[in-house]
Image: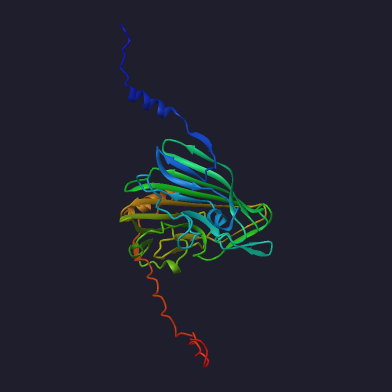
């Protein structure tokens, strides 16, 4: 009796080969100026790693690495880069305005007197359902010597509907030369997301867990959310806080220009390290339902918390500009008799 045989299509063979391929890892060069990150062939992120202190203008453009996040089609970033209002707000970024080190205070939020500089190549590891980009970042003092060495990772995942992207941010901060204290305020410290400068500021809204939550008076919120409109299209982003992050974390989520973020305080002892973990979920349109949000949060934290009530608030309306005060300019003096007009 002949053994049974079945025809195998080219598509089936290709799929079988794909499923047998292990995760691929490669070193992506930091030049030209950024590393594009793809998930299942789609452009999802751009890790901007340029550093060029050759002129004051160029230094300002390149004094910190940050992550651009793209729209669902992978065509355009929905996040902000250098320039615009508050040039130091860039995509997904990390920093503290008041870092205590050796008896002085260093600003690695606005990058006054020092920079965050990516060292070497960015390692990109691609698998079927996720892509991870990892880099080493030196937080340099005024002399260009690192007082914090950071391992920064972004892991992109396929997301549950109606979201189109799920992103895990992990930062391990090590103090190689002496203890550092991370401090500031919710507006000027922590791990933040800034949407494009071109959003419709009148449409910006925020979402929080709990009934009548006041984000300014709350701490250790498990997540915060924002809805913004860019190019006539609505987007939602949520940031999840891991329970192992420092306690007492406060959040900033109320500005009409759309920056949201979480602000932990911490002290890293000499030679010690601090690990920070956050998850971002992006969707087109309005916010995902509370059950979807809680499911994503529970998967991130390993908890089984119930679906909460939620509070939705419009962004703050900025105060109107102050009217000009009375003129202090003196009228021109009358010409002296007999002088030319």
Residue at image location 52% in from the left, 54% down from the top: 244
The x and y percentages for residue 241 are 46, 55
Residue extending farthest bottom: 337
Q: Classify 117 as above or below 198.
A: above
Q: Position of residue 322 (x, y in %)?
A: 42, 78
Identified at 55% across, 61% down, the residue is 110
Image vertical order of residue 38 relative to residue 247, above or below: above
The quarter in which the N terminus is drawn is top left
Q: Position of residue 268 (x, y in %)?
A: 62, 56
Q: Residue at x 67, y 55 (%)?
A: 270
Q: Is residue 109 left or right of residue 232?
A: right
Residue 95 against residue 28 in the figure, above or below:
below
The answer to whether one can see residue 55 in this image is yes
The one of 271 and 36 positioned closer to us in this rendering: 36
Residue shown at the point (35%, 46%) measured from the top left: 72
Q: Is residue 154 left or right of residue 267?
A: left
Residue 286 appears at what percent x and percent y?
31, 56
Q: Is residue 165 left or right of residue 113?
A: left
| Residue 102, image quadrant | bottom right
């Amino acid at each position: 009796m002949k053994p049974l045989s079945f025809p195998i299509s080219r598509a089936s063979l290709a799929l079988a080969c794909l499923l047998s391929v292990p995760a691929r890892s490669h070193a992506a060069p930091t030049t030209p100026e950024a590393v594009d990150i793809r998930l299942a062939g789609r452009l999802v992120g751009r890790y901007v790693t340029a550093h060029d202190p050759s002129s004051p203008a160029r230094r300002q453009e390149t004094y910190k690495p940050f992550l651009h996040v793209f729209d669902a089609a992978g065509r355009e970033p929905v996040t902000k880069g250098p320039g615009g209002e508050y040039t130091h707000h860039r995509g997904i970024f990390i920093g503290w305005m008041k870092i205590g080190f050796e008896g002085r205070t260093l600003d690695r939020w606005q990058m006054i007197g020092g920079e965050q500089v990516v060292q070497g190549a960015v390692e990109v590891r691609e698998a079927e359902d996720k892509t991870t980009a990892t880099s080493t970042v030196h937080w340099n003092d005024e002399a260009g010597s690192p007082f914090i060495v950071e391992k920064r990772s972004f892991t992109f995942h396929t997301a549950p509907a109606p979201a189109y992207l799920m992103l895990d941010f992990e930062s391990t901060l090590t103090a190689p030369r002496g203890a550092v204290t991370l401090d500031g305020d919710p507006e000027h410290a922590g791990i933040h997301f800034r949407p494009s400068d071109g959003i419709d500021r009148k449409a910006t809204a925020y979402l929080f867990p709990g009934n009548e939550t006041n984000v300014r008076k709350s701490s250790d919120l498990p997540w915060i959310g924002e809805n913004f409109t860019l190019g006539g299209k609505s987007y939602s982003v949520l940031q999840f806080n891991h329970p192992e992050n420092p306690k007492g974390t406060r959040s900033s989520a109320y500005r009409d220009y759309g920056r949201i973020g979480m602000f932990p305080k911490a002290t890293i002892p000499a030679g010690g390290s601090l690990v920070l973990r956050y998850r971002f979920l992006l969707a087109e349109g309005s916010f995902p339902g509370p059950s979807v949000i809680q499911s994503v949060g529970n998967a991130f934290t390993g908890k089984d918390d119930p679906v909460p009530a939620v509070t939705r608030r419009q962004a703050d309306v900025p105060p109107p500009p102050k009217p000009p005060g009375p003129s202090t300019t003196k009228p021109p003096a009358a010409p002296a008799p007999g002088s030319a007009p």
